[in-house]
Amino acid sequence: MVRTALHVLELLFALTVLYGVALVHVPTALVLGGLAGVVAVERALAGPPPTAGKERRS
């Protein structure tokens, strides 16, 4: 629960920053948004692989 709340806060912060940059210069906000997307995908892929269930030990 806490981890989900932190992810939501992080997302809101990033969107707020991108919105503020877009008010000044739209192309820069698009570039930063693209970089943020790449970082998000890399972070998602760096985590441990999801498991379907508990592994059985013999």
Image (tube, rainbow, N blue to C red):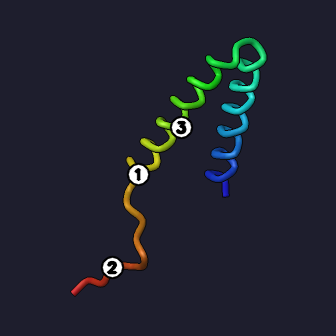
Tag 3 secondary structure: helix
Furthest toward the top, the residue is 24
Residue 10 location (% of width, % of height): 65, 38
Task: Give the alpha-carbon distance from disc 3 to disc 2, as whole Å.
Answer: 33 Å
* Kind of residue sitting beneath label 2: Glu
Identify residue for label 1.
47
Eye-nearest disc, 1 or 3: 3
Which residue shows up at 21% across the image and 87% down it?
Answer: 58
Eye-nearest disc, 1 or 2: 1
Task: Give the alpha-carbon distance from disc 1 to disc 3, as whole Å.
Answer: 16 Å
- Residue 55: numbered disc: 2
Q: Is residue 15 above or below residue 47?
A: above
Tag 2 secondary structure: loop
Name the N-terminal-most of marks 1 and 2: 1
Which residue shows up at 38% across the image and 61% down it?
Answer: 49
- Residue 37: numbered disc: 3
